[in-house]
Image (cartoon, helix red, strand yellow):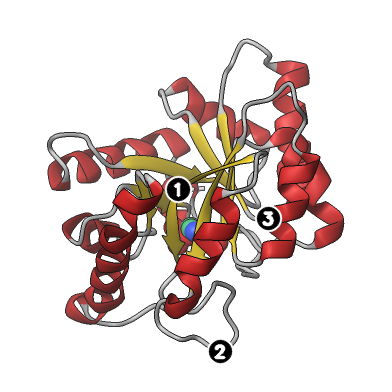
């Protein structure tokens, strides 16, 4: 590997601070496909929030930290598609689920959240640019899903999340990011939302310019993934 996680993370932190001098935007380090040692390297530089896409892999990492580094307190965000048979393991271990796009999955997470833990923080995932194969609800259906989720005792609705399709130009990337910010502003007072999760390695700066509150950055921190993104 040419560069270390430390070097890359510092570069991302510097770029983010330049775009967001007041430090309002949270950085989620997306560690999917990378081992717990890579997470530990980032944690030693003060990174505390990590994102995982695959239930089994993510839960194994959470368990590894509990066993080997109970002194390190991390915040774990589940950001991938979630099948019904994997909701329990996620509800028992994660702090956030950002990929809520169905009442049924939300209901299972709420029912399965252990009562000795705080409610699971959740974001409704929006298919903002109408991608056919993508997860996420249509913008017109966001309010109804927010209403359903807000009523679930095991969940705390915190906001919205989106994964716009990659686009060549900076201006092209901004259109869905702006649409997400408008949708967020429409709903935030009604539902008490404080989190808009958008912006990845390729569009982090544009997302900050368009009003994100949390960027999810993987490859710019951990390097090229050993296997491709599956969702
Ligand atoms: C993989 C992934 C990311 C990070 O993507 P990079 O391009 O590596 O920064 C962010 N969000 C979601 C939902 C992902 O699946």
Q: Write the residue at 23% across / 44% down.
A: 16
Spatial CA distance of label 3 from label 2 is 22 Å
Would you say 42 lies left or right of 215 here? Answer: right
Q: Secondary structure at mark 2?
A: loop
The quadrant of the image that shows the C terminus is bottom right
Q: Residue furthest right?
A: 85
- Pointer 1 or 3: first along the chain: 1
Spatial CA distance of label 1 from label 3 is 41 Å
Label 1: few (<14), some or many (≥20) within 10 Å? few
Tell me the residue that label 3 is attached to.
Answer: 106
In the image, which is nearer the foreground, mark 1 or mark 3? Answer: 3
Q: Write the residue at 73% across / 54% down.
A: 107
Query: Which quadrant of the structure image shows residue 186?
Result: bottom left
- Pointer 3 or 2: first along the chain: 3
Tell me the residue that label 1 is attached to.
Answer: 2
Tell me the residue that label 2 is attached to.
Answer: 132
> Which x, y percent locates residue 64?
75, 28
**Looking at the image, is 32 positioned above or below residue 153?**
below
Q: Is residue 44 visible?
A: yes
Q: Is residue 54 visible?
A: no
């Amino acid at each position: 590997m040419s560069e270390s996680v430390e070097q890359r993370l510092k570069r991302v932190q510097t770029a983010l601070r330049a775009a967001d001098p007041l430090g309002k935007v949270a950085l989620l380090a997306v560690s999917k496909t990378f081992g717990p040692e890579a997470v530990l390297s980032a944690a030693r530089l003060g990174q505390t929030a990590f994102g995982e896409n695959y239930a089994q892999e993510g839960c194994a990492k959470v368990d590894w930290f509990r066993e080997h580094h109970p002194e390190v307190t991390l915040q774990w965000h589940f950001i991938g598609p979630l099948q019904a048979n994997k909701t329990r393991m996620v509800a028992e271990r994660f702090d956030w689920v950002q990929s809520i796009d169905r009442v049924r999955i939300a209901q299972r997470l709420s029912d399965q959240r252990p009562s000795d833990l705080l409610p699971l923080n959740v974001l409704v995932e929006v298919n903002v640019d109408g991608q056919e194969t993508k997860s996420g609800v249509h913008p017109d259906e966001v309010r109804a899903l927010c209403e359903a989720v807000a009523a679930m005792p095991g969940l705390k609705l915190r906001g919205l999340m989106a994964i716009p399709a990659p686009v060549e130009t900076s201006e092209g990337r901004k259109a869905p990011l702006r649409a997400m910010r408008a949708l967020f502003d429409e709903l935030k007072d009604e539902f008490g939302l404080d989190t808009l999760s958008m912006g990845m390695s390729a569009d982090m700066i544009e997302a900050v310019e368009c009003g994100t509150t949390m960027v999810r950055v993987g490859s710019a921190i951990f390097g090229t993934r050993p296997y491709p993104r599956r969702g």
